[in-house]
Image (cartoon, rainbow, N blue to C red):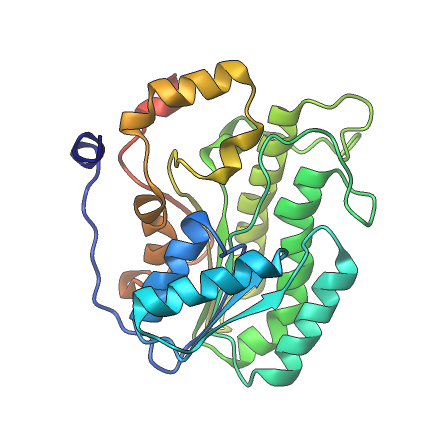
Amino acid sequence: MSSLRNVFRRSWSCDEKLEGKVVVITGANTGIGKETAIDLAKRGAEKVIIACRDMEKANAAVKDIIESSGNEHVVCMKLDLSDSKSIREFAEAINKDEPKLNILINNAGVMVCPFGKTADGFEMQIGVNHLGHFLLTYLLLDLIKKSAPARIINVSSMAHSWGSINLEDLNSEKHYNKNKAYAQSKLANVLFTRSLAKRLEGTGVTTYSLHPGVVQTELIRHLNGVQQFFMKMVSPFTKNSVQGAQTTIYCAVDPSLEKESGGYYRSQVQQFFVAI
């Protein structure tokens, strides 16, 4: 199975080091977020902070990341992106305790989940995937600008391409379609990245959004029966978490992107999924 997967992967490598860099990654206790944390820690980051809702899983992930990377400067902090109080508390702690923040990776998210609302009354997918990260980025922006050159990476999805922003029913209260709500939140990620890039011109802070590929992670747990069956059928052609993290890592470290900002990045493999 793994050998078949590798047929559809193009290798990417970069030996860029991250000495002296402080990194925050949301939702990095599992999946591509965790693999991103391992990679950036291996590159010698001064500190990697994984921001997670479930602290039991986060603490276990920290041990794994340290063991895998050999970098002991990895910590976890509590962050619930569905609660603005938690977001503000997290940002306050970062601004107080960290002298710099060079890389912010907005990775956490929910996908096609049943209808629910955040603590602040927003539909869960737009609330967590976009609004939570929007507030977090806003609250950390002064520190990020002070740390320039710095990067902000928003993990989106190719689903953004069939999404639209429904300003008449942003919370999907009139009619909830979990697929459309997900696509809306991922489009918001891309639009936020572009807008932020314009606002940050000349500051030394650059922004990137990306599609990690079709990845076998815990995010697929809310897919319906037909979708789950489809994912099993195409699983030999999907990515594992290590492969899925590569586009995020590319946006976070590749020197060639230093002068680029606001763009959307995706692997050049797996494009056949767009047509399916």
Which residue is pictured at 46% across the width and 66% down the height?
62
Quadrant in the picture for residue 176: top right
Q: Is residue 258 visible?
A: no
- Quadrant (top left, top right, bottom left, bottom right) of the C terminus: top left
Q: Is residue 174 above or below residue 193?
A: above
Which residue is pictured at 83% across the width and 44% down the height?
121
In the displayed structure image, the side of residue 219 where residue 19 appears, left or right: left
Quadrant in the picture for residue 98: bottom right
Q: Is residue 221 visible?
A: yes
Tell me residue 66's x, y (percent). 38, 70
User: Toward the viewer: 39 or 20?
Assistant: 39
User: Toward the viewer: 53 or 39?
Assistant: 53
Which residue is pictured at 43% across the width and 75% down the height?
149
Quadrant in the picture for residue 116: top right
In the displayed structure image, the side of residue 116 where residue 3 appears, left or right: left
Q: Is residue 198 above or below residue 240?
A: below
Tell me residue 267's x, y (percent). 31, 40
Q: Is residue 34 above or below residue 99?
A: above
User: Toward the viewer: 220 or 180?
Assistant: 220
Tell me residue 219's x, y (percent). 52, 37
Which residue is pictured at 22% across the width and 30% down the height?
1
Q: Is residue 212 above or below residue 96?
A: above
